[in-house]
Amino acid sequence: MDRNKKQRSERTESAATERVRGAGAMAETEERYRALFESALCSVFIHDLRGNFIDANETALATLGYQRKDLPSLSLSSILDSAYVATARKRIEEMIASGSSLEPFLYKVKKKNGDFLWMEVVSTLIHHDGKPYAVQGMAWNVTEQLRIREALEQSEARYRTIIETMNEGLSVLDRNGTLVLVNSRFCSMTGYRKEELIGKHVSIVLDRDNERILRNQWLLRKKGFAESYEITLTRKDLAKIETLVSPQPVYNQDGEFDGSIGIFTDITKMKHTERELRSYQERLRSLALEISMVEERERRYIARELQDTLGHMLTYCRRKLGELCESLSSPDVCAAIKEINQIIERTIHQSKALTDEFSTQILYENGLEAAVRWLGSQFQQLHGIVFRVEDDLKPKPLSDETNILLYQSVRELFMNAVRHARAKNVSVRFERDYRHIRIDVRDDGVGFDVSKMAFSSTQKDMFGLFSIYERLTYLGGHVHLESGPGQGTRFTLVAPLKSPGRK
C-alpha cells in the first residue's frame, strides 16, 4: 500500500516536472521566434483572416512609418492601395481553401505619410488547433528596384525606337560572328526578315571576297581597333549593296572581346556617282590630252608652212635682189636693195626662230633633255634668268604623248617662274628609275603656302598647273609640289617610261 502511494507520488512529481520543462521549452521557442521575428531584415507582419493586424516587427513598422502603439488600428484596408484590397482578401481565401502558401505577389502599399511603396509579399497560413488562425507575411521593399527596372525599360524602349527609326542599318554580332540583333533598316538593306537573320552567321549576307574583308576586320576588332571600312552586302535577291561600316567592339564584364556592333550606311548610289565621275574625269583627261596633241600637230603644221613657204619665198627674194643689185650700176639703188636684203635677212631669222618655237623640232630630233636645254637658253636670253640642267644620262624612252606633255609642262613651269615666282635661278634635273622618269624643276622665287593651294581649274593663275596635273594623271604619272613663303618652289613631274613595243 505504501509502495503504491509512493509510486503515485513519483508519477505526480514527474508529470509536474515535464509540465515545467515543457513550459520552459515553449518559452524558449517563443523567445527564439521573437528574436528571429524582430531581427529579420525584411518586414514581417501577422494579421487575422479578416486582415486586421495582430503583430509586426520593427522593420515593417519603420518601413511604413508607424509605431507599435499604432498596430491595433492597422489593417490591410488601411495600408493597401484601394485597388489591391480585394485582391489581398481573395488571396487569403485561396490560401485557406488550398491550405498552402501562394506565389509572391506585388502590392502597392501606403505609408503613414501618404507616400506609396511597392512591396513583394510572401504569405503563409498560421494554424491553431488544426484550423487556420492568421496569416504571416514577409515583405520586401522593391520600390527602388522597380524604379530602376522601369527606367531601364524606358531607356531600352527609347534606344530601340532610335535603333528602329535610324536611317542606317545596325547589326550586333556575338563573339562567333552570329547575328543577335538587327534593326529594320538592316533588313530592308539586305532583303531578309529579322527571323531569317537572327541566329545566323553574318556570312549569310556576304560573298566570299567580302567574307575575307570581314575576317580581317574581325581581327582588328579583337585588338580594339574600330576604324570605318567599306564592305559589300549581298541581298537575299543576290543584288549587291555597297556600304560604309562604323564598327565598335563589345567586351564582357571581364574585359574580354564578346562581339561587335556595326552601323551600315548605304553608299551604293554614292559609289556609282563616284565611278561615273571618275569615268567623266578620264574622258576629260583624254580630251585634254587629245587637244594637246591636236595643238602640237597644228603648231608643227604652221611651222612647216612658215619654213616651206614663207622661208623659201623670203630666201628666193633675197637671192633675186642680190642678183638685181649686181646688174645695176647705180650706187644709190644698190644701197637701197642691200637695206631691203638686211630686212629680209632679219625676217628670215625671226621666221626660223618662230618656227623653232612653234614646232620645237629639236624635241623630235634630239629628245626631251636637249629640247629643255634649248628652252632654258631661250628663257635665259629673253628674261635674264640663270638656268642649269642636270641629267643622270640614263636612257629614258618616252611615248610621243608623254614627250610632248612633259615638254609643255616644263615650259609652263618656266613661265610660272618668270611671271609669278620672280625667280633668279631655275634648275632642272632628269632622273629615271625602273619604270618612270622624274623631272625636278626648282626655282629660288618667292614661294607660297602649299596648304592654301589646290590644283583647281577655277583659279585663273593655277589653270596651267591644273592642266599639268590632270594630263599627267591620265598618263599614269603624278605631280609632287614643295614650297613655302620665301623658300622657292620645287615641282617633281613623274611619268611612266614607254613600254617595249609601244609607239
Image: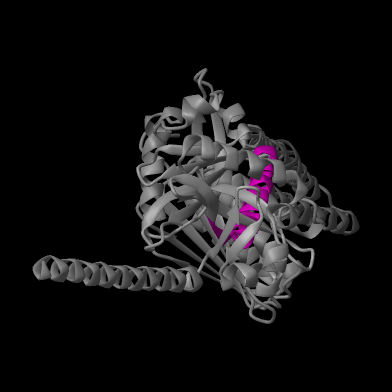
Left or right relative to 285: residue 240: left
Q: Is residue 139 magenta?
A: yes
Q: Bounds of the magenta span?
A: 137-165
Left or right relative to 421: residue 204: left
Identify the residue at image location x=76%, y=69%: 420
Q: Could you say where residue 486 lies in the image, as x and y percent from the top left?
A: 68, 82
**Nearer to me, 329 or 386:** 386
Against 42, is 488 above or below? Answer: below
**Nearer to me, 353 or 75:** 75
Residue 316 falls in which quadrant of the image? top right
Q: Could you say where residue 377 lies in the image, as x and y percent from the top left?
A: 61, 66
Q: Could you say where residue 83 lies in the image, as x and y percent from the top left?
A: 75, 44
Residue 235 visible? The answer is yes
Against 363, is 309 above or below? Answer: above
Identify the residue at image location x=68%, y=77%: 445
Left or right relative to 461: residue 170: left
Q: Is residue 399 magenta?
A: no
**Nearer to me, 174 or 121:** 121
Against 217, is 69 above or below? Answer: below
Identify the residue at image location x=36%, y=59%: 256
Identify the residue at image location x=39%, y=48%: 218
